[in-house]
Image: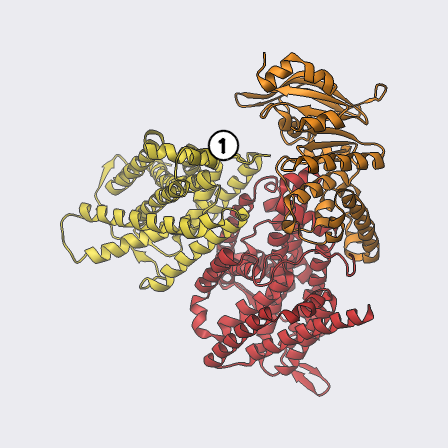
Amino acid sequence: MSASPTLLSCRDLSRRFGGLLAIDRLSFDVAEGEILGLIGPNGSGKTTFFNVLTGIYPASGGSVEFAGARVTGLRPQQIYRVGISRTFQRSRLCLPLSVFDNIMVGNHSRLDHGPWLNLFHRAGLRRQVSENFAEARELIQVFNRSLADRMLEAVGGISLIDRRRIEICRAMISRPRLLLLDEPSAGMTREETSRLMDDILEVKRRFGRLTIVLIEHEMSVIERCTDRCVVLDYGKKLCEGTYAQVAQNPLVRQAYLGIS
Amino acid sequence: MPAAISRGRVSASAVAAVFAAGAALFLAVESQRGMLALLLAAGALVVAIRRLKGLRPFLQAASEHEETGALAGVAFTLLLCVLFRDDHFTVFLIGRVLLATLACLGLHLQFGSAGVANFAGAAFFGVGGYTAAILSAHSPIPHIVAVALGGAVSSLIGSLLLLPLLRTRGHYAALITIAFGLLFRTFAEVNDSLGGPQGLKLQGFQLFGWQFNEELAIGPFHGSFYINYVIAAVALLAIAFALVRGLDRSWLGLALDAVRLDETAAAAFGLEIARWKIVAFTLGNFLIGTAGALSAFMVGFIAPNNFTFAESLTFVSIVLLGGIGNAWGVALAAFIVVVLPEKLQILQEYRFLLFAALVIVVLRYRPQGLVPRPLRRYFRGLA
Amino acid sequence: MSIGLLAQYVINGMMLGMMYALVAVGFTLFFGVLDVIKFSHGDLVTGGAFAGLAIYSFLEHIDGGGTWWITLVVAIAAASSMAVLGAVIGRFLVLPLRSAPSLNTLLITLMAGTVVRESIRLFYPGGSQPHRFPGLLGARAFQIGSLTLRLDNIVLLATGGLLIVGMHLIITRTRLGLAIRAVAQDEETARTSGINFERMVLLTFALGSVLAGIAGVMNGLYYNEINFGMGLLLGVIGFSSAIIGGLGNMYGAILGGFLFAALQTIGAVALPFASAYKDVFAFAAVIVFMAWRPTGLIGERVSERV
């Protein structure tokens, strides 16, 4: 884990909402291929960090570099195109659309949007649709075999847990370089969470090259699946390191447990 | 497979036949009582069909064979023309229904695909008509090109309006189109180059020597000259339908859906919101303007009185009643909205009120409209 | 241009601005409280005017005293009838559609406005014709140099001003206003604070519609004429004004109303040969403005949590 190049690096990243400093001079690196856990109490700025990173909110200060290029100030569409993909804390699927459609929403960088293919060269489109269908099917199968047979059903009729899985597939289908998962296991039992993380790790293994930043509250997941973690509190970085290191840190224990 | 495909084709044709028969009956009925009886019968039929579970697989198969259904629809429409060939008014009505469908297909693209509100449908319809009128009267441009230019000018004016605003929230588009609709009418009335309150007259449509305003005569077959216009309208509508359905069943349609349903998520996955809205809006206005241009030729004149806000709302009502996501529903609703007030004369005065009330009921209790939005099946036999 | 003419334009502009502001405040209240555009608002102005006229026609036969008394009754009739109508539309059409896409609410209120408008046209006796609105405030005027000041205009201006100040006081000084602001800011928090969300929303709708009703009567008194379509353009202008000022912001709405009137006046002065074009000019200016500052002068309330 040591010699991997740095994929993402933020320096003094800040975001202010009126009088509230939601993230405060955040600085840390993410190495290529690693799984980084982002943890902290509620309201510590984790989702805000994702939102600033993906361009939904502009940064109030500091900078972020991705694969050597500066990405602060880019719009969400540009962030996606450089290879950063995400899930949302509050599920944002298009309920009236089918499972396949929803997954394909995440795949726009790899789909051909030319009018020729889409409107006239139907045979070519059919080929592309079939290929993508097979690929999406394969991906969703890792998470839930039965969903593979429900690809053309409306998402609105699918269970909440399965919707979370579909949303993760949507973020993964475009083979991003960096995947941001915002509490992917929300609403799941211990067992479901454990299975979900196994499935995510399986996909990572298949893709070969994938870096993940994971916001998670379930500490056993962090311990088992992440290589390192960063702890936030009130928008500031408290500390970083492996889970074992971080769990011992007195500042962390105070923030979480109130033990001084 | 072959058996399933032919079952699908037969079902689609059967559905088209049923609708065509219904249309023929509605068009033929003269008395008010006959009309009411027919409405009741139609209502009963709809209820019966929904109860009969056994019909489901046939309807499902029919929906997978849209192309056949469309071809059947074209054939049956022409058949209707043969049936009513001596009745100017009825053929004219058919033409109006077809052109209203064309215009509302454009609106459906804007509202139902991209979620862009357009309350100036009648105004863009009028822009197309005025373009055709001016070009046909003052330039040697062939009429068919004038019709296309009617669409183009509508698109152009539409994009001028919307370009700066599509970066922002939906209600701005609503406001601007409402304002544009209101102002267009005043503008047309005040402006003498557009003929003022009397409007402009148009000569009959000509296509390579085929005079549309002359009675149609093919061998022993004689028919109202309006049939010429119906044929042109059917051709345009067929192309537009293919375009709109093809668009929906492709990656483009998916992008539009994503933009409409959740802009934030769509942006997070690389979709340029403004670009897609502009595409839908511009294309939609092209269809509306083209319909308006051909309609101007068919009617023979164009006047500001026809492009009021109430007319724009009528177009919107058609899209909402038909089912905001379903192109076929647009055709059905267009037929109802255009034909019913003509046949039930008591409705004429009250039609804006009634349709507004009907839309309220639909939006409140059945927002998906008469015909619900189908799930996207890109191709037959995908799964 | 003489001072008198200039002053005339100014007073005219202020009158218009006042009426636009009243309508705009309604729009902004609805948006603030429920994130909805209630397009029936403009037609409630028409409704108020006709309700006032109807009451007047009824009272005309009863000579119960001076015109001031009748004017007050007319205004109250307009205000209260529209308050009820506004609340009814809110209760049956807007509140039930909260979870639907906002386009649906826009559409349903637009249709509701059409129903009001068409109902007036069809069911009010002679509805499709313009109606004379009684000059209840008298025709007294006095001269200051080359300027003719009409008493009724002054009364209208003063009334409008009082209404706006009254609204401001209600919103900022009363418990009702506090509840409205709480609901506008955050539904959940307001609910947990014990506020009855639905009741507050309906009250806000009623309040905004009161303004519409009175604006309708003011319109009638100013132009001495009303017609069934008057609310349409007023609604669009009111909405534009609310947007210019930033949706959700009451002071922005007032500012926007006066700004729009100023734009129209400038247009009328600059293009004296075609008064129809003054509206085109004003709206073109609004479009350009919105392209530059889409969230309005004072800023629209952003409500989405990502």
Residue B62, compared with residue B271, is above or below; it is below
| Chain that the image shows in orange | A
On screen, residue C102 versus residue C62, left or right, reads: right
Residue C270 visible from this viewpoint: no
Residue situated in front as seen by the camera: B218 or A35: A35
Residue B340 rendering spot, x and y as whole percentages = 51, 71
* Residue type indicated by callout 1: Leu
Q: Is residue A51 left or right of residue B41?
A: right
The residue at 53%/81% (across/down) is B29
Residue that label 1 marks: C297
Q: Which chain is red?
A: B
Percent of width and height locating residue B88:
58, 79
In the orientation shown, which residue stands out farthest toward the front? A191
Q: Secondary structure at mark 1?
A: loop
Residues B176 and A200: in front is A200
Q: Callout 1: residue from which chain?
A: C
Q: Which chain is yellow?
A: C
Q: Is residue C23 above or below residue C181?
A: below
Which of the pair B62/B128 is nearer the observer?
A: B62
